[in-house]
Image (tube, helix red, strand yellow):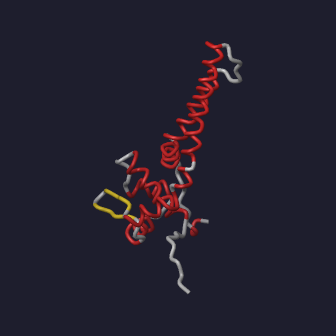
Amino acid sequence: MKRREKDELKGDKLRELILLVYLNNKYDKEKNKVPWLKEKLGYSTGGLYHALDESGYFERKGDEIKLTEKGIRYLNKQLLPQYTVFYPIGNFLIILGCVFLLQWYLWTYANIPMIFQWHSAVIVIVGGVVLRFFFLRIVYLVMSHRKIKATNPENE
């Protein structure tokens, strides 16, 4: 019986490190520095260097940290689908808002009865645009502004 290998990671910190490095490279080119990552994810210095060098998901060249092909594959298969699920919802809200605007236009200029006002259509369109185009950026802002305290069992 053949066993199928899967890319599985142990630990939420490594998953968050992969996502944070990807989002840093996409949105903010200057923040992939070891002290900043250590502070945001709660790694010890040795633990972060070990994760970066020994996991096979990252490559370091000086201050630059990038994902390897293995890291990109894991990111696309395991991490990003939970965020990109909001893209179709955003598209739906944009289309629904356009239908609301069309319905308002028909009521205003053709006297066809309407259900929604124009401002509710604008709110739905703006919500759809935010979900579709800015959701990952919002996730990045939340991840980059939070600070996880490093846990040390000796101090407890």
Give whichever of 28, 120 is nearer the camera.
120
In the depicted view, which residue is nearer to us: 91 or 70? 91
Q: In the displayed image of the protein, which residue is found farthest to the left?
A: 62
Q: Position of residue 125 (x, y in %)?
A: 57, 31
Q: Position of residue 87 (x, y in %)?
A: 54, 45
> In the figure, 22 relative to 128: above or below?
below
Horizontal side, residue 27 vs residue 109: left or right = left
Furthest-bottom residue in this view: 1
Q: Which residue lies at the image location 66% right of the left edge and 16% below the top edge? A: 107
**Which residue does the image show at 63% across and 20% down from the upper left?**
104
| Residue 67, horizontal then vertical, whole percent | 38, 61
**Residue 47 place in picture, x, y as percent:** 45, 68
Q: Is residue 133 above or below residue 80?
A: above
Q: Is residue 31 above or below residue 43?
A: above
Point out the image quarter for the C terminus. bottom right
Query: Residue at image x 28%, y 60%?
Result: 62
| Quadrant of the rendering where the N terminus is positioned | bottom right
- What is the total number of numbered labels drawn onto the structure image? 0
**Residue at point 38% right, 58% down?**
34
